[in-house]
Image (cartoon, coloured by chain):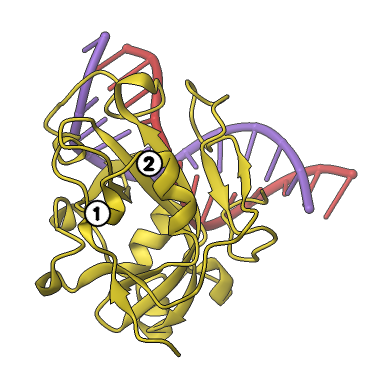
Chain colours: A yellow, B purple, C red
Amino acid sequence: MARRCRLPRSFYERDPRLVAPELLGKVLVRGGVTARIVEVEAYCGSEDPGSHAYRGMTKRNATMFGPAGRLYVYFTYGMHWCANAVCGDEGQGVAVLLRAAEPLSGLDEMRARRPKAQRDRDLLRGPARLCQAFGLDGAFDGIDLPTASTGVTIADDGTPPPEHPAVGARIGLSTGADLPWRWCVPEDPHLSRPA
DNA sequence: ACCGGGATGTTCT
DNA sequence: GAACATCCCGGTG
């Protein structure tokens, strides 16, 4: 296996629609718990009616407007957390939502945090399930992914992104649902929904 | 397999 | 007061 390195800040400092497909195949890391990202969505700030940032900065979405490379973790539906990587330039409010991943290591810890998951392929199949399995919640909002000391990061282990990713509409939106800003590893069994 | 509804509480109108 | 970047369970076929 090739050596794993944290993605540098410059990776994130671009349009989320460029960053998103390149995140496919990268490795989400929290200590010994790791997983390969297979599904993501781009959220594009003031030009995107589906984005939390569409109506400007609020207390909840403030992290989105900060520097690229931070983790934006938000609470939704009264019980779930979801995690994004902030992209672009500071003040833009753009990010990539991490929607699904393939478990690589730390499976026992994931299973312990998600006792309801029947099969290992269900551990990270969906943005809130992914956060549950990794133990990500509001305490992780704003942490800096490129910084070594945080323990949470996204790394490159040499696996290239798919040459022809599946692209389609984002999931769960009432507005902005027509925009094709969801990217997946084609045919991957760990997707939240087929591509 | 697919579908419908309930859980649960923060955020914004 | 409504909406919400979701998940889980229990129905039916």
In the rendered image, residue C2, in percent from the top left (x then y), is placed at 38, 15
Q: Where on the picture, by quarter, is residue A29?
A: bottom left
Q: Is residue A114 above or below residue A165?
A: below
| Quarter that holds the N terminus of chain A | bottom left
In the rendered image, residue A159, in percent from the top left (x then y), is placed at 50, 74
Q: Which mark is residue A10?
A: 1
Check whether the beta carbons of the residues at disc 2 and disc 1 lie within 8 A of each other: no
Q: Nearer the viewer, residue A144 or A11?
A: A11
Q: Residue at x 58, y 53 (%)?
A: A184
In the rendered image, residue A7, in percent from the top left (x then y), is placed at 29, 65
Q: Nearer the viewer, mark 2 or mark 1?
A: 1
Dot 2 falls on which chain?
A: A
From this viewpoint, which residue is outermost toward the bottom?
A1
Residue indicated by mark 2: A16
Q: Give the mark count.
A: 2
Q: Is residue A126 left or right of residue A6?
A: right
Label 2 sits on what residue type? Answer: Pro
Q: Residue at x 61, y 43 (%)?
A: A167
The answer to whether marks 2 and 1 sit on the same chain is yes
At mark 2, the secondary structure is helix
Q: Is residue A13 left or right of residue A150?
A: right
Q: CA distance from mark 2 to mark 1?
A: 12 Å
Q: Is residue A3 above or below residue A195?
A: below
